[in-house]
């Protein structure tokens, strides 16, 4: 099998992040913070690349920080931002679990979403829909990703011809309460 025959099923994470960032720019955000997991994850690199593309096109500035899911480090980081009056208007997290950790830290720090700060993340789920407040997300359609991967795998196992080795699944921004108040930044 050549590299051209490697089956690749994914989202266009660069484009998804660019669209989310543009959506937030349209809501008048100018002060962004991306929080991503430490590690060498292609999906995180792609989401940051898409975010930076949108930010650069608008000549805005963003901060990008990487954390292990260490509650105390993240809490200390946000406490320093509060103490120095340097909170961004919006925090984008690279995934839902990190987002929920941030939400619980904001609760402890008495930061109210969406009035004090706004939040958005990737990978929609019922956790995001029922969070307090419900979180704006990029739906990556994981069920469809899995179905197409399983179908492709079965085709390979059964010796069937593979049509379309590279499949990109569209994403959708789902706006919820975490970004519904227009920011005056």
Image: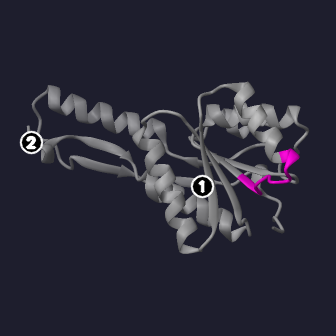
Q: Residue furthest right?
A: 110
Circle 2: element type = loop
The reply to whether the magenta stretch includes residue 87 is yes
**Residue ranking furthest to the bottom:** 58
- Percent coordinates x, y for residue 142 in the rendering: 47, 38
Describe the element under mark 1 as helix, strand or loop: strand
Is residue 130 shown to the viewer in this render?
A: no
**Left or right of 173 in this view: 147:** left
Q: Is residue 175 visible?
A: yes
Tell me the quarter of the image containing the N terminus: top left
Q: Quadrant of residue 40?
A: top left
Residue topped by disc 1 = 173
Q: Indicate whether residue 53 is drawn in magenta.
A: no
**What residue is drawn where x is 88% and y is 36%?**
109
Instruction: Tell me if 33 is positioned left or right of 83 in this view.
Output: left
Q: Position of residue 38 (x, y in %)?
A: 53, 34
Query: On the image, which quarter does residue 86 sit in?
Result: bottom right
Position of residue 45 relative to residue 29, above or below, is above
In front of the other: 20 or 148: 20
Residue at the spot 30% in from the left edge and 49% down from the top edge: 167
Secondary structure mostly taken by the magenta-highlighted segment of the chain:
loop
Q: Is residue 65 above or below residue 24?
A: above
Q: Which mark is residue 85?
A: none
The percent coordinates of residue 93 (x first, y second) are 62, 43
Q: CA distance from mark 1 to mark 2?
A: 35 Å
| Label 1: few (<14), some (14–19) or many (≥20) C-alpha neighbours in 10 Å | some
The stretch of residues the image draws in magenta is: 82-90
Residue 2 circle label = 2
């Amino acid at each position: 099998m050549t590299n051209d025959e490697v089956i690749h099923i994914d989202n266009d994470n660069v484009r998804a992040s660019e669209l989310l960032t543009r959506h937030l720019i349209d809501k008048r955000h100018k002060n962004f913070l991306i929080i991503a997991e430490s590690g060498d994850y292609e999906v995180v690199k792609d989401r940051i690349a898409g975010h930076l593309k949108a930010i650069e096109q608008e000549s805005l500035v963003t901060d990008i920080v990487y954390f292990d899911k260490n509650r105390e480090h993240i809490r200390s980081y946000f406490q320093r931002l509060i103490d120095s009056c340097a909170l961004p208007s919006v925090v984008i997290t690279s995934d839902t679990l990190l987002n929920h950790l941030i939400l619980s830290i904001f609760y402890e720090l008495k930061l109210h979403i969406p009035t004090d700060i706004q939040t958005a993340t990737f990978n929609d789920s019922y956790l995001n829909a029922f969070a307090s407040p419900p979180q704006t997300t990029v739906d990556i359609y994981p069920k469809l990703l899995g179905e197409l991967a399983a179908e492709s795998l079965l085709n390979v196992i059964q010796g069937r011809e593979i049509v379309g080795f590279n499949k990109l699944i569209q994403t959708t921004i789902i706006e919820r309460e975490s970004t519904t108040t227009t920011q005056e930044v």
